[in-house]
Image: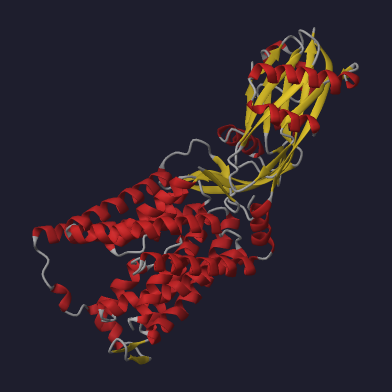
Amino acid sequence: MEVYLPIAGMSVNVFLILGMGVLVGFLSGLFGVGGGFLLTPLLIMIGIPPAVAAASDSNQIVASSSSGAYSHKRMGNVDMRMGIVILIGGIAGSTIGVQVVKVLRQMGNFDFVLKAVYVVVLGGISSYMLIESLKAAKGTVGKEKKGESCFRRLILKLPLKMEFRDSGIKISVIFPLIMGLIVGFLAALMGVGGGFIMVPAMIYILGMPTIKAIGTDLFQIIFTSISATVQQAIFNHTVDIGLALLLLFGSTIGAQFGVRAGRRLKGKQLRILLAAIVLIVMMEMLYELIAMPSNLIGLTTGESGH
Amino acid sequence: MKEIALYHKLRKVSFKSKIYFLLIMFNFSFLSASHAGELAVSSIPEQIYITLKYAGEKITLFGESEEGAHIIVKMTSMEDEKLKLSKKGKRGIFWINVKSLEIVNVPSIYLVHTSGKMSDIPKDIQRRIGADKDYSTVKSMARTNPEDPETKIFIDGYVKLKEEQGLYAIREDSVKIIKGRLFKSEFFMPSHVPVGSYRVDSYAVKENTLIASGSAEIKLGKVGIESWVTDLAMENGLFYGIMSVMIALLAGIGVGFIFKGGPSH
């Protein structure tokens, strides 16, 4: 069954998009990560214009994180103060990101930058996960995280300290602000939620309790993604609501199965599997950047859609 | 329009009876118009609506000409395309866009169907009707903005790109001649063809002379929700963005309630 996407300006197979949503939702349910970082590349692979893929993905993240954020808020897992600090950074970051997207599209190199950033980020994540899971498989991973890294010590020395009572920590606002800025920027550029960077940073560097980190991350993701979506709609006209809705329904269904499957499977094998999937997507993108194009002349993803 | 309504009623009837219907239809509606030099042609459909379920559309072109004539049918866009193109070059190990130019004066679609071989048609006629095997008419009309020493490379690359997308093609032997006088050719418009007006020019060539020509017009437009969404997104981005966010929030929370517990992230 085909459906025409008005902003992407092409028709797509409904089941293909739903299937991608299911796959990414399944992975996110399984591993507890957002999955936005896989969705954008998958959409690009089936021919959705990259800028439309990233912007619609932001819109989809608004939907897929809303119910999670709502229930975490009700259970008191959101550190509001921390959330707002990160959010200030996040909105600034996504505002800069949207303008960077606009400039890059005019210069005609948005696609290249997007793919290059993806290769770097995905490559980093997958190699980190592979090393960790291989170490874990060998049993060499101890509790070395307990020891305070010098990076954390540096963060603790920063000025402008603020008390975050919900998380029981007192720390400088500079680091959360910068984290928000980076994640907001990536949200606009890549259409990702950024939980894969934010959650570990909040746990290991800020020293927040895991459940608060997840709840607060979801809280900031919603607002950062809303900011990214609205600004993409204003400045780049690239949000395809039809595409976002299809992805949402797929990923919600997938997430349910993912959570169930995750309870039965072993964590270590899961991590290796996820690392392998991320690595494959990364390789595909890298190949596109270095392989000789069949036609040297290509369309510049211009300002106007169809 | 009446003929089209009738045609749709007859759609389920066998192919043979459709042909008879068309024979009758043409005799009624076109005999008066088919004096010297004019080729009677008609496209079905004449208007293509992009709806939610649009996945491209097959266009059938019917016409009537003299017996034994060579038929050339050319579909082009009425509006010329204005596109930004980039040329890739190698920088280090990466292929990156190194130059951008705007290409103008080119149709967004250029499909030529012929009943025989292109080489059977004299060159001067090919030039006159703007249809030849290596797109030289299209290429000679095309310009870039700004003019550049590499303009030719951009134009050649553009044509190649269009061929890959199935929007530029020369297809020989793809006009069917039925019962000597009637001809028929099928075009497929992929879903990514931009909205606008398209024309189909038909030419009859006999004994190295262009004996008749005629044209039909096809309109492609978004309707209903597709046109509403596009207009809103292009003209009122702020409202569209807020609307998209609200829909996403409602849908997300709604679906979360249905599944209880909501999606984990």
From this viewpoint, is residue A124 visible? no
Q: Position of residue A98 (x, y in %)?
A: 54, 66
Name the residue nearer the viewer: A103 or B121.
B121
User: Residue placed at 80% from the left, 7% from the top?
Assistant: B207
Q: Quadrant of residue A137?
A: bottom left
User: Residue placed at 31% from the left, 61% from the top?
Assistant: A29
Q: Position of residue A223 (x, y in %)?
A: 47, 75
Residue at the far left in the pictured view? A139
The answer to whether residue A76 is above or below residue A258 is: below
Q: Position of residue B61 (x, y in %)?
A: 72, 26
Q: Quadrant of residue A117?
A: bottom left
Name the residue nearer the viewer: A268 or A183.
A268
Q: Position of residue B226 (x, y in %)?
A: 64, 52
Is B65 left, or right, of A160 in this rendering?
right
- Name the image quarter holding the N terminus of chain B: top right
User: Residue placed at 40% from the left, 46% from the top?
Assistant: B93
From this viewpoint, is residue A180 visible? yes
User: Residue placed at 13% from the left, 61% from the top?
Assistant: A136
